[in-house]
Amino acid sequence: MAALYDQVNGWGPDYEYWLQVAGTMSALDVADLGCGTGQLTVLFARAGHRVVGIDPDPGMLQVARARKGQKLVTWVQGYAADLATASADLVTMTGHVSQVFLTDTEWAKALGELRRALRPGGRVAFDMRNPHARGWEAWNPTDSRRSVGTDSGVAEIWHEVTAVKDQLVTFETTTRYTDSGRAEVATDVLRFRDEPTLRTSLISAGFAVDQVHGDWDGTPATKLSRELIITATRTVRGPQDQAGPAVEGRRNVAKAAAATRGRETSR
Ligand SMILES: C[S@@+](CC[C@H](N)C(=O)[O-])C[C@H]1O[C@@H](n2cnc3c(N)ncnc32)[C@H](O)[C@@H]1O
């Protein structure tokens, strides 16, 4: 799968969008969680950001580490919990990485780790396929079938949904090599969350939602948008902070740190 990922998921308008998000906020440090084969991760680095690409899949990272420009990125095999504390101005989860967190507990835990990894004022940015658009209905052998060239000749790839339950979509991806007839089948499960659910989870994790776009051209999301493209800012106070004078103290420290960082990062 890792070997064919770039052929199936090439450059798209989402890359322009994410590069603009990072550029507009002048993010010094970007952590790309679920960086996969690192196509976009290297582009972040080429655009002048200091970048950590992190992914749990060694196969994906192997492709990333063979990529031109890979030396510009620090690659880490791991999860959100492996990100260093207060190390990033922006954490991205592109290519619908947010959908791999199947349970509410997993999602809340991941957001908590991202908040910890972000500096005060830092942002998380990610995309989610909107469940109301029911995009999985096109994941069938007819609509999803395409051919790609591989080292082992031409391969046909298609998807087939096998279950839809409780916002969880289970589907198979078949890769069949035309010459040999050999076929590989992989099963995946993705969680679809709608906009209100995402907003609530972000607020609970200590983020303020900045914007929700429904398309890569920056159109605001509607109930039926295919995509929910979200940017949210880490709030000064999070769920783990307690009210009282100690919090006020921390808030002032955070304000001072943010002001200092603002000077450091202006270009
Ligand atoms: C669809 S790919 C997206 C890759 C890349 N971000 C892009 O835009 O093309 C999803 C990636 O999420 C990674 N992943 C799976 N579970 C994860 C987890 N719990 N935390 C972070 N990444 C995860 C996978 O290994 C895979 O590389």
Image (cartoon, grey):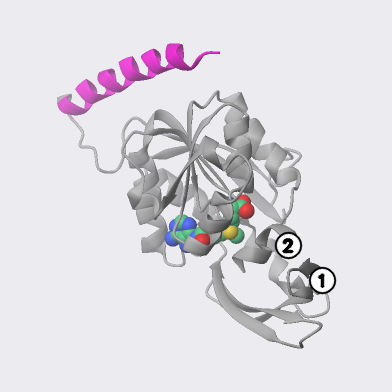
Residue 148 lies in quadrant: bottom right
Mark 2 touches mark 1? (CB < 8 Å): yes
Q: Residue 209 location in percent, x, y?
A: 51, 38
Q: Is residue 209 left or right of residue 256?
A: right
- Check mark 2 vs ligand 1: CB closer than 8 Å? yes or no: no
Question: Which of these two is toward me, 33 or 66?
Answer: 66
Numbered circle sitting on residue 146: 1
Query: Tag 1: Cα neighbours inside 10 Å, few (<14), some, or many (≥20)?
Result: some
Q: Quick one: 9 or 143, which is closer to the camera? A: 9
Specify the principal SS of the magenta part. Answer: helix
State the residue at coordinates (53%, 35%): 72
Q: Say whether residue 263 is magenta.
A: yes
Residue 182 in the image: above or below residue 264: below
Q: Earlier in the sequence, mark 2 or mark 1?
A: 2
Residue 15 appears in view: yes
Q: Position of residue 225 (x, y in %)?
A: 72, 53
Q: Give coordinates of residue 51: x percent, y percent.
A: 50, 36
Is residue 192 depicted above or below 182 in this figure? above
Query: Which element is circle 2 on?
Result: helix
Q: Is residue 171 above or below residue 194?
A: below
Q: Does 184 sit above or below residue 193? A: below
Bounds of the magenta segment: 246-267
Q: Which mark is residue 247?
A: none
Left or right: 252 as drawn, with respect to 29: left
For label 1, the SS is strand
Disc 2: CA contacts within 10 A as few (<14), some (14-19) or many (>=20): few
Percent position (x, y) of residue 73?
Answer: 51, 39
Q: Which residue is mark 2?
A: 8
Dot 2 amino acid type: Val
Q: Amino acid at mark 1?
A: Arg
